[in-house]
Image (spheres, grey):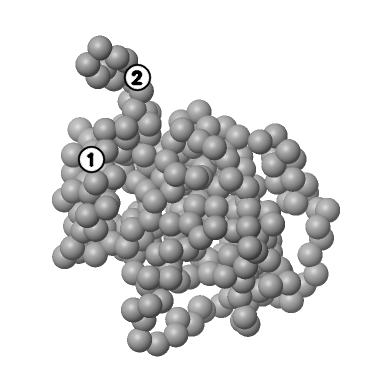
C-alpha cells in the first residue's frame, strides 16, 4: 500500500470486518496471491498511484451487506477513492450504527435512497434532486447524500425493506439510457449497474460531471488491471483507458 494512500471509510470497514472473521475470506474467481492493501490488486497491478480524489458537493453513503467490504471486486471501494465525502456502514437487520443515524439526521444533507422505482410506492419516488430549501432567514441548498445499497440484488431488496430508518427519505429512481459495462461479476440484466456505475449516474444528476466522468474512468482502469492480473497479462500503460483517466486527473 502506498504511504500516501489514507484508509477511507470502506477500507476501515473492511478492517473491522476482518477483525471479527473466524476464518480467512477467500475471493472466488479473481487473481490469487498477495494483494495491495490500498487497492486490493496484486502488487504488480497496483493502482494506488492512480487514485483520483475529486472535490464534490455531493456525498455517498454506502450500506454494505456483510461480505461486500471483503470482496476484491467490490466497487464501493472505488467510490471512496474518488468521492471525499464517502461514508460506509455495515448493514444488519437487528441493529443500526448510531453514526449512520447521526449522518442521516445532519441538516446539511438531503438523503436520497437510490433504488429502482418500480419496486417502491410511487409517492416516494423522485427522478431529480430537490430544489432549494429555506432555513430561517437564509436560503441554501442541502447537499445531496446518495444512499447506495451495496449488495447483491436480492440482498439490496432485503436492505431496502428491512431498514425502517430509510422510510422518510425520497427514493431516487435512475433512468439511464446506457447499459452496464461492468465486467467483474455477472448479472442476468443489462440494466443492473454495479455500485460505482450507480454513483457516477448520481454524481452526473447532481451536476458533478467531472467527478462522474472520473468515477467511470477509474472503474474502467480498475477493471482492466483486475482482469489482466487474473489472466496474468501485461498492462499497456498508454492505452485509451489510462490516457482517459490521466487527462481527467490533469483537470482537477
Q: Name which residue lies at 63% across and 48% down.
A: 52
Q: Is 81 or 115 nearer to us in this picture? A: 81
* Residue receiving disc 1: 105
Among all residues in the image, which is located at the extreme front?
Answer: 3
Disc 2 from disc 1: Cα separation: 17 Å
Left or right position of 16 against 199: left
Expressed as whole percent of the image width and height from the top left, the position of residue 225 reads 68, 64
Q: Give the residue displayed 34% in from the left and 69% down from the top.
A: 66
Q: Quadrant of residue 117?
A: top left
Mark 2, other Cα within 10 Å: few <14 / some 14–19 / many ≥20: few
> What count of labels does the image hold?
2
Residue displayed at 51% across by 78% down: 27
The location of residue 63, given as percent across then percent down, is: 33, 56
**Where's the C terminus, which quadrant?**
top right
Q: Is residue 118 left or right of residue 177?
A: left
Instruction: Identify the mark at residue 140; answer none if there is no mark.
Output: 2
Q: Residue at x 53, y 66 (%)?
A: 73
Residue 33 drawn above or below residue 225 = below
Above or below residue 62? Residue 129 is above
- Kindly indicate the quadrant of the structure image that contains residue 89: bottom left
Helix, strand or loop at mark 2: strand
Horizontal and vertical percent position of residue 44: 73, 72
Q: Say which label, 2 or 1, has the lower sequence index.
A: 1
Pick the quarter of the image with the N terminus.
Answer: bottom right
How dense is the environment of label 1, judged by Cα within 10 Å: few (below 14), some, or many (20 and up)? few
Q: Badges 2 and 1: C-beta atoms under 8 Å apart? A: no
In the picture, the disc for residue 67 is none
Q: As drawn, which residue projects farthest toward the bottom?
A: 23
Amino acid at each position: 500500500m502506498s504511504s500516501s494512500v489514507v484508509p477511507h471509510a470502506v477500507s476501515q470497514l473492511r478492517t473491522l470486518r476482518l477483525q471479527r472473521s473466524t476464518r480467512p475470506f477467500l475471493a472466488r474467481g479473481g487473481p490469487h496471491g498477495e494483494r495491495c492493501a490500498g487497492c486490493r490488486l496484486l502488487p504488480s497491478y497496483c493502482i494506488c498511484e492512480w487514485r483520483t480524489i475529486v472535490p464534490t458537493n455531493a456525498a455517498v453513503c454506502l450500506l454494505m451487506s456483510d461480505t461486500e467490504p471483503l470482496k476484491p471486486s467490490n466497487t464501493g471501494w472505488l467510490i471512496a477513492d474518488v468521492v471525499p465525502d464517502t461514508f460506509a456502514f455495515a448493514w444488519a437487520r437487528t441493529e443500526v450504527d448510531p453514526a449512520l443515524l447521526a449522518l442521516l439526521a445532519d441538516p446539511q444533507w438531503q438523503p436520497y435512497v437510490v433504488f429502482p422505482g418500480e419496486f417502491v410506492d410511487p409517492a416516494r419516488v423522485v427522478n431529480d434532486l430537490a430544489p432549494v430549501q429555506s432555513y430561517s432567514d437564509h436560503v441554501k441548498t442541502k447537499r445531496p447524500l446518495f444512499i447506495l445499497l451495496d449488495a447483491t440484488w436480492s440482498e439490496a431488496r432485503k436492505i431496502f425493506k428491512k431498514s425502517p430508518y430509510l422510510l422518510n427519505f425520497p427514493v431516487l429512481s435512475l433512468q439511464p439510457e446506457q447499459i452496464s459495462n461492468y465486467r467483474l461479476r455477472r448479472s442476468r440484466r443489462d440494466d443492473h449497474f454495479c455500485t460505482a456505475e450507480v454513483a457516477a449516474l448520481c454524481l452526473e444528476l447532481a451536476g458533478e460531471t467531472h467527478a462522474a466522468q472520473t468515477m467511470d474512468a477509474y472503474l474502467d482502469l480498475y477493471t482492466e488491471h483486475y482482469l489482466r492480473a487474473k489472466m496474468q497479462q501485461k498492462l499497456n500503460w498508454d492505452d485509451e483507458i489510462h490516457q482517459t483517466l490521466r487527462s481527467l486527473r490533469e483537470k482537477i
